[in-house]
Image: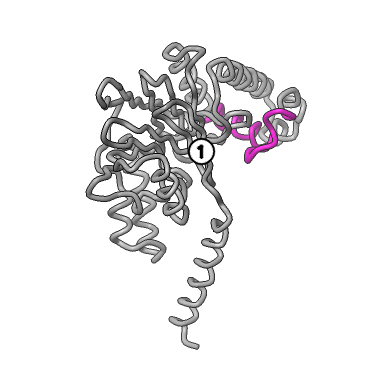
Amino acid sequence: MNMYRITLFALCIFSGCLNAQYENVSISVDTLTTKTYMLTGRGGNIGIYIGADKVFMIDDQFAPLSEKIKTTISSLTDKPIAYLVNTHMHGDHTGGNSNFNSKTTTLVAQDNVRKRLIERGLKNVSEQKMSQKDYEKSLPEITFSKGMTFFDGEETIMLFHVHNAHTDGDTMVYFVNENVLHMGDTYFAGRYPYIDLNNGGSIDGYIAAHRKVLPIIDEKTQIIPGHGRPSTKSELEAYVKILEDLRSLVQKEIAAGKSLEDVKGNSSLTSKYDSTHGNGYIKPDRMRETIYNSLKK
């Protein structure tokens, strides 16, 4: 077997293994209002708003799930998806971009998301992990710096950028009349957050994002987190207080001259929150490590 066939064989096996991971994934639906829904599968939570004659979609999870996601959306409405917003650049929120991008669907994101997707996409094309066509279709076609607004009948849809929170390109989406807020990965409900320091995230920016949005919403607001179950303003308020407390505790350790290994190994710093928030993707020691590295930066 020559090298080409060996490589092709390996890629087929790899692709088969990847697709097998998604075969048993089902897409569940939470009805938030008569027009807004949260879809959960594998990856970031998807937001769906059904307008008068079109659909507004937020994030699209992984590429192998696209057909399941489309089927689920078609069970809710037969209206076309007009706009698909990426809340940030990670693959569990943008992996299906090229599958959804079409003559009727336009991709929208903050400026830095397009920049990040270009960097990642060109690398994937050069490594033959992505075709040139899929790369081109994966890129947002409309971008913005600070924010933008869509109008659909009486509904106002506000997109606003929060700086250096989960990444450097985070967008929150607020449906004003429906009173539904999609926070992307600037909120991991009921679990410690993943703050991507390598892509512009920071603990200070993460907390600032929460503080920015809290005055906008009220107790009736339904929040779609990037990960976790639908949430409320009071839950978000409690969550940001936890993060502020953890930041303060780690900052005191830094001021006392403690090293990264000291902080990472000091379980007492996060112990009062670990049982409720430390069982997700980000474990307590990694949370302490992230906050330390972010503050030292």
Q: Nearer the viewer, residue 289 or 171?
A: 171
* Among the 4 quarters of the image, the one containing residue 245: top right
The residue at the point 46 percent across, 56 percent down is: 64
**Along the horizontal axis of the image, is 207 left or right of 256?**
left
Outermost residue, left side: 103
| In the rendered image, the vertical position of residue 211 relative to residue 124, given as above or below | above
Magenta part of the chain: 274-297
Overall secondary structure of the magenta section = helix
Residue 135: x percent and y percent?
32, 56
Label 1 secondary element: strand
Magenta-drawn stretch contains 230:
no
The residue at the point 37 percent across, 23 percent down is: 175
Residue 8: x percent and y percent?
46, 76
Q: Nearer the viewer, residue 293 or 96?
A: 96
Residue 33: x percent and y percent?
44, 25
Residue 180: x percent and y percent?
43, 23
Q: What amino acid type should be assigned to the residue bearing mark 1?
A: Val
**Along the horizontal axis of the image, is 8 left or right of 142?**
right
The residue that label 1 is drawn on is 29
**Along the horizontal axis of the image, is 234 left or right of 263?**
left
| In the rendered image, the vertical position of residue 242 relative to residue 192, given as above or below | above
**Along the horizontal axis of the image, is 295 left or right of 171?**
right
The residue at the point 52 percent across, 46 percent down is: 27
Q: Nearer the viewer, residue 103 or 204?
A: 103
Q: For label 1, count other residues whose C-alpha is less than 10 Å away and answer few (under 14), some (14-19) or many (20+).
A: some
| In the rendered image, the vertical position of residue 276 relative to residue 139, given as above or below | above
